[in-house]
Amino acid sequence: MANVVVVGAQWGDEGKGKIVDWLSERADVIARFQGGHNAGHTLVIGETVYKLHALPSGVVRGGKLSVIGNGVVLDPWHLVKEIEGIRGQGVEITPETLMIAENTPLILPLHGELDRAREEAANPGAKIGTTGRGIGPAYEDKVGRRSVRVADLGDRATLEARVDRALTHHNALRRGLGIDPIDREALIADLEAISEKILPFAAPVWKVLNEKRKAGKRILFEGAQGALLDIDFGTYPFVTSSNVIAGQAATGVGLGPSAIDYTLGIVKAYTTRVGEGPFPTELTDEDGKRLGERGHEFGTTTGRQRRCGWFDACLVKQTCATSGVNGIALTKLDVLDGFETLKICTGYDLDGTRLDYLPTAADQQARCTPVYEELPGWSQSTEGARSWADLPAEAIKYVRRVEELIECPVALLSTSPERDDTILVTDPFAD
Ligand code: GDP
Ligand code: IMO
Ligand code: MG
């Protein structure tokens, strides 16, 4: 009855959705614990493609409890639309199958507006390249103690007081930016209208999950983004506004850290990044173009083209450490089919000194050049492989070398977007 945390170990889009969906068969509860609808998780099940943003990737399997934890920031209007869309694909979503923590802070339209206004006003080098969904401003309000939270939707007087608290700050800010102040009455009316659709899902998630845990139920924590976008350990300031690493799973739902038995890092067999910021192994040549084309590297949320590069073992070793990763799911190995040689970054050269981690100082990061080792590629297809025996020897060598360099074993291997094109090496849920 292990509880498993799934975290992205690079810059997001590692294939978390596919792996969470695959693992959710073994779980009773699937819980999101950070981020918001900046996430875009793709599930491919036969002919059907599901794109989930705020909903946990467990929703498509019947008989599971999906949870949106307090560590998330939630846009209620987006969620209602997403639920309608997913219901349209034949998935049943009811208050028995979906719970939202009452202490979850809301993303309001003013957060998205502020996010986009800041990005537009920023000089080219200062743009973060956010998803524009209001994530940063909503988390700022959470720590600024001026959020409207799910529970506030249940009482008109509290709701008004919370909105006033938020608007005291935001209207001052908007005046400075030359944006019209918020129409208080319209915002309250909109929140009251959406509350009817949100409140039926509201629950004391911390209590429900503690009880589930005591009853021996298995909880699967679904991370969004990736550890290199973590607010503390990512490539700051080109990061998201939440803690992404595994430690957040406990605080993001209201369980103690001892509830986490196993952390699975999701790792793409090469590297991608969407948005601005450092990316030591980025390729702007034909190889990079080829990775992007073969991997269909376009963002699930914004449709933006993802930057592509060689596998960076140095960075993944680092993210496995900060999340305490027990094993990884290596995804998109098939995208590397047909390359004559493959490169893996094993460290950096900084002004003549060899480093085995990416330094924190921005000027040093900019001067780091990757140190590569080369491995032979393979010409056979690995697409859809469902056992080690289906893999060419060079592909196995590549996987083994990745394990050695990141000092972490492969627990799962993914060879196509399809749910069942997955090789199980070690079951993260095994006792
Ligand atoms: P997430 O944000 O980590 O859930 O990842 P995304 O869904 O944003 O992006 C991963 C993309 O890769 C999706 O389109 C998946 O369907 C696809 N994908 C996942 N695993 C594999 C794999 O092993 N091979 C290939 N070719 N595609 C995969
Ligand atoms: P999933 O869960 C990849 C990136 C944005 C931007 C930075 C900050 O699908 O892996 P934000 O809107 O969060 O303030 O943007 O973070 N970003 C992601 N990149 N995958 C994601 O989610 C991301 N969520 C945010 O592109 O660089
Ligand atoms: Mg994604």
Image (cartoon, rainbow, N blue to C red):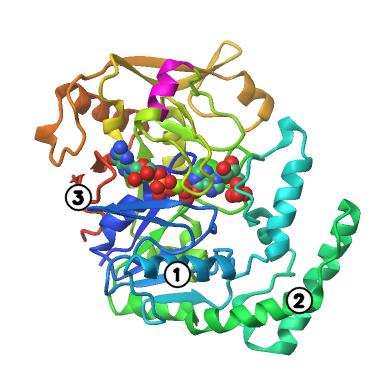
Question: The residue tagged with tag 1: helix, strand or loop?
Answer: helix
- The stretch of residues the image draws in magenta is 285-292
Given the image, on which type of amino acid does mark 3 rest? Asp
Residue 132, horizontal then vertical, whole percent:
64, 50
Residue pictured at 37% horizontal, 60% vertical: 57
Report which residue position mark 2 lands on. 186
Q: Closer to the observer: label 1 or label 3?
A: 1
Q: Closer to the observer: label 3 or label 2?
A: 2
Report which residue position mark 1 lands on. 83
As for residue 289 lying within the magenta part, the answer is: yes
Q: Earlier in the sequence, mark 1 or mark 3?
A: 1
Task: Give me the C-alpha separation between circle 3 and circle 2.
Answer: 48 Å
Report which residue position mark 3 lands on. 420
Given the image, on which type of amino acid does mark 2 rest? Ala
Residue 29, quarter of picture: bottom left
Q: Is residue 180 visible?
A: yes
Residue 108, horizontal then vertical, whole percent:
68, 66
